[in-house]
Image (spheres, grey):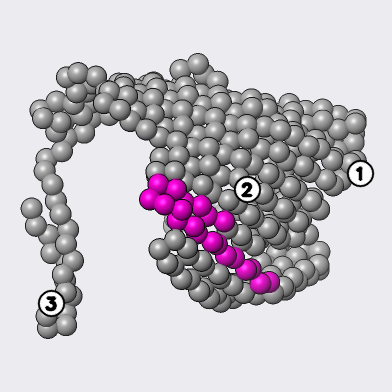
């Protein structure tokens, strides 16, 4: 007689912070556009209508949350072709950033023992009026001026509750956020040297309350980068990319300056069929993200540094050209043919 004992083990996770809930979201949209262009002038106008229906049922606490809204989003642009080298575009659009499920999810997501992130089931959609004026010269220089006026701005922040050591990452709506900017991008190449550059200056204002404190702030900041390419004899090319972003203030959070420098050397062989590239990324090891959060009763510093300084080698070989052509048969059928 053989006796076999079966032992059943059931593994159950930590249910302390479990929340049982159902999330349903439905979006219905319709849009129409009208555009027309002439030699010197063109325009485009559009209208999009959306209905959003969100239902959240928190079964654990018998709490039911429902949100339904219908919104119209107009947009339009005016294009002026001043001459062959100069164009001007004026544009406006009304934009929406609706919260997704993870932003509404109230379940705690632990990053470590002293930090966790949690959503906000009461977060509202963010609406923005966007306006910009673009001037383009000879497809080489673009000058842009823009302004964003946002209502119910979605703001991510961190805080530590009283009598606790745990920091919490969450989000809230700020009633007002304004952002004005001016940017310039340009590119050019001569025989042995080419460059691409981009720079932008911004003025931003925040207003609202967090932790029962006014967090009104205004800040100026800038970002600039430039890529230089040097075309040397014997199919050598050297590229140097550098970028710098200034510090800036967003409510209680001060984001610190960030920069990076990348260098690469490229050599072509066998009539430019074989290319070997050696690249060193983040030469000065300054490409990291950090910010300080300051309230009247607490201050925290967050620092995230990864292995951004990397050496890479890339080898590529071009065997030939392959051209894909799509032809319509005279009998009404269609086909895609490939040929060398």
Which residue is most to the left?
Answer: 340
- Where does residue 63 sit, x and y in percent of width and height? 81, 67
Whether residue 26 appears in this view of the structure is no
Provide the residue designation for mark 1: 212
Q: Main secondary structure of the magenta part?
A: strand
Q: For the point 48% across and 37% down, which residue is it?
A: 185
Few, some or many residues within 10 Å of mark 1 (<14, 14–19, 20+): few
User: In the rendered structure, does residue 213 fall within the stretch colored magenta?
Assistant: no
Q: Residue at x 74, y 37 (%)?
A: 250
**Left or right: where does residue 240 sit relative to residue 204?**
left
Q: Nearer the viewer, residue 91 or 104?
A: 91
In the displayed structure, 19 sits above or below 260; it is below
Residue corresponding to mark 2: 146
Residue shown at 60% from the left, 52% from the top: 132
Q: Secondary structure at mark 1?
A: loop
Magenta range? 71-90
Foreground mark, 1 or 3, reads: 3
Mark 2 or mark 3: which is in front?
2
Q: Quadrant of the N terminus?
A: bottom left
Kindly tell me whether residue 340 is visible in this rendering: yes
Q: Position of residue 196 (x, y in %)?
A: 42, 32
- The residue under label 3 is 329
Q: Identify the mark nearer the N-term, 2 or 3.
A: 2
Q: Position of residue 265 (x, y in %)?
A: 30, 21
Graded by Cα atoms within 10 Å as few (under 14), some (14 to 19) or many (20 or more), the crowding at tag 2 reads some
Q: Which sits in the foreground, 202 or 215?
A: 202
Residue 109: which numbered mark, if any? none
* Label 2 to label 3: alpha-carbon separation: 49 Å
Which callout, 1 or 3, points at the residue further toward the start of the chain?
A: 1
Task: Report the Cα–Cα distance between label 2 and label 1.
Answer: 32 Å
> Is 80 contained in the magenta span?
yes
């Amino acid at each position: 007689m053989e006796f076999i004992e079966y032992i059943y083990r059931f593994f159950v996770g930590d249910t302390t912070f479990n929340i049982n809930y159902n999330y349903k979201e439905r979006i219905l949209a319709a849009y129409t556009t009208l555009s027309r262009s002439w030699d010197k002038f063109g325009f485009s106008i559009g209208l999009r209508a959306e209905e959003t229906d969100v239902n959240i049922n928190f079964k654990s606490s018998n709490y039911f949350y429902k949100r339904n809204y219908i919104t119209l989003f107009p947009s339009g642009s005016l294009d002026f072709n001043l001459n062959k080298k100069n164009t001007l575009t004026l544009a406006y659009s009304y934009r929406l950033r609706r919260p997704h499920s993870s932003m509404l999810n109230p379940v705690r997501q632990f990053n470590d023992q002293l930090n966790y992130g949690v959503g906000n089931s009461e977060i509202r959609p963010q609406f923005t009026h966007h306006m910009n004026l673009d001037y383009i010269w000879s497809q080489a220089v673009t000058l842009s001026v823009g302004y964003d006026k946002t209502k119910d701005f979605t703001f991510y922040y961190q805080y530590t509750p009283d009598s606790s050591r745990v920091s919490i990452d969450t989000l809230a709506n700020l009633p007002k956020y304004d952002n004005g900017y001016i940017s310039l991008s340009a590119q050019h190449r001569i025989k042995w040297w080419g460059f691409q550059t981009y720079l932008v200056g911004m003025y931003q204002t925040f207003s609202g309350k967090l932790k029962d404190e006014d967090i009104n702030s205004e800040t100026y900041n800038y970002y600039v980068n430039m890529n230089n390419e040097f075309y040397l004899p014997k199919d050598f090319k050297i590229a140097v990319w550098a970028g710098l972003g200034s510090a800036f203030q967003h409510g209680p959070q001060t984001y610190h300056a960030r920069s990076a420098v990348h260098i690469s050397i490229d050599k072509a062989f066998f009539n430019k069929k074989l290319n070997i590239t050696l690249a060193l990324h983040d030469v000065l090891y300054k490409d990291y993200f950090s910010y300080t959060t300051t309230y009247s009763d607490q201050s925290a510093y967050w620092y995230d540094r990864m292995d951004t300084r990397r050496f890479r080698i890339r080898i590529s070989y071009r065997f030939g050209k392959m051209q894909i052509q799509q032809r319509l048969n005279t009998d009404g059928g269609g086909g895609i043919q490939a040929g060398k």
